[in-house]
Amino acid sequence: MPPIIGIQFHPAGKQYHFDAQGVTDLVAGDRVVVETARGRQLGIVTGYVAEEELEGRACKPIERCATPSDLVKQEQWQAKALDALVMCEEQAQRLGLKGIKFARAEYSFDGSQVTILYATENKRADMTALRRELKRGLRTRVELYQIGPRDFAKLIDGLGACGARRCCARFLTQFSSVSIRMAKLQNISLTPSEVTGVCGRLRCCLTYEHELYAEAAKGLPKRGREIVTPYGKGRVVEVRTLVGQVVVDIDGVRKVVEREDVGKEELSRPPVLETDAWLPAAPSPDPAVPEEGESAAPAAAPERKPSRSSRSRRRRRRRRSKPATAASKGADRPRGRAGQNGKRDRRG
């Protein structure tokens, strides 16, 4: 079987398969020229493809490897694609076409065809007049392709609701089906702002952890169901999928029931009380205990800290026994001069 090569025409775009029998020494990242339904295109090699991925489909051959002049020509057509997109929007406004969003204009490798991708919710929009006006203005073959809202968000790029670059524009090569059951299983709020992306559809990231939650939810009852527990019969008010627990309302009292205790009347293991976590640890052996044949040293009495009342009594004793200073002596003397008999002299 000839070697099959995977080729992408856009970063994070869909991968197409081509026969590489006529071209050798291809590695990932090389540019090649191939023939597609939109004319000759310049693609990027992603790597070799296994035979199981083909599923019996025939592949077109690769014409040749791209040359430096081919790369320069491709850049020139990409610069003209922006002018074609601006012209398309102006003609759509002049023709009165409303509710149409144009995403991108793409020229073929040789410039023989320009493809304009657009998205709209108006299924009755007639694009015949617009195609005719563009063909007259661009003087080349014009093709208009309608794409979905997810493909439109992928092309315009930007940031998602999480603040990072959108997954579809970064690494998703194809979109998987997403259902509202995935959000319910992961206990995500069903408000539109929480489960929908910028494209207005359910977020693609809901599929990332769906298999993990589906495996963890086995054996757990759904919310609102009445079950039998070791504490009695009650109704499930909360499901903790990842930890394997359910919260059951039993006569107004909520109990946490483990997965293995659902439907049983006795606990599979003794419950762990909240007070057990605060019990002191078992005393470790004292290294100071003498071994057999040795004399035990007298244990030192534990140092006792003085109480608050004893400290205050000590302070009062110190104040009484403290000698009077010169400043305190001077403060106790009477003002003026005193005579020999201790009386103050009165001098006129």
Image (cartoon, rainbow, N blue to C red):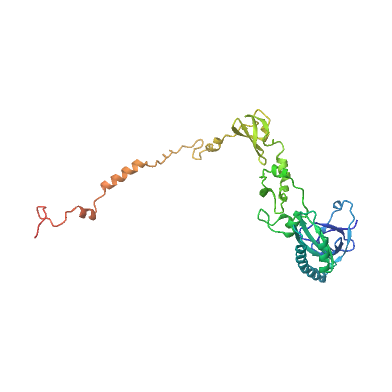
Name the foreground residue: 100 vs 21: 100
Q: What residue sits 62% from the left and 33% below the top?
A: 249
Can residue 43 be seen here? The reply is no
When asked about the image quadrant of residue 19, the answer is bottom right
Depicted 99 relative to depicted 268: above or below: below
Which quadrant would the N terminus be assigned to in this image?
Answer: bottom right
Can residue 106 be seen here? The reply is yes
Residue 98 picture location, percent across and down? 75, 58
**Seen in the image, is 23 located left or right of residue 223?**
right
Which quadrant would the C terminus be assigned to in this image?
Answer: bottom left
**Seen in the image, is 121 located left or right of residue 284?**
right
Q: What residue sits 72% from the left and 41% below the top?
A: 215
Name the foreground residue: 151 vs 45: 151
**Seen in the image, is 335 located left or right of residue 82?**
left
Residue 63 picture location, percent across and down? 88, 64
Depicted 308 relative to depicted 226: above or below: below
Name the foreground residue: 297 vs 234: 234
When asked about the image quadrant of residue 142, the answer is bottom right
Depicted 184 relative to depicted 45: above or below: above
Depicted 221 relative to depicted 87: above or below: above
Q: How many marks?
A: 0
**Seen in the image, is 199 located left or right of residue 134?**
left
Q: What residue sits 66% from the left and 49% below the top?
A: 193
When asked about the image quadrant of residue 173, the answer is bottom right
Q: What residue sits 76% from the left and 64% below the top?
A: 94
Residue 80 picture location, percent across and down? 78, 69
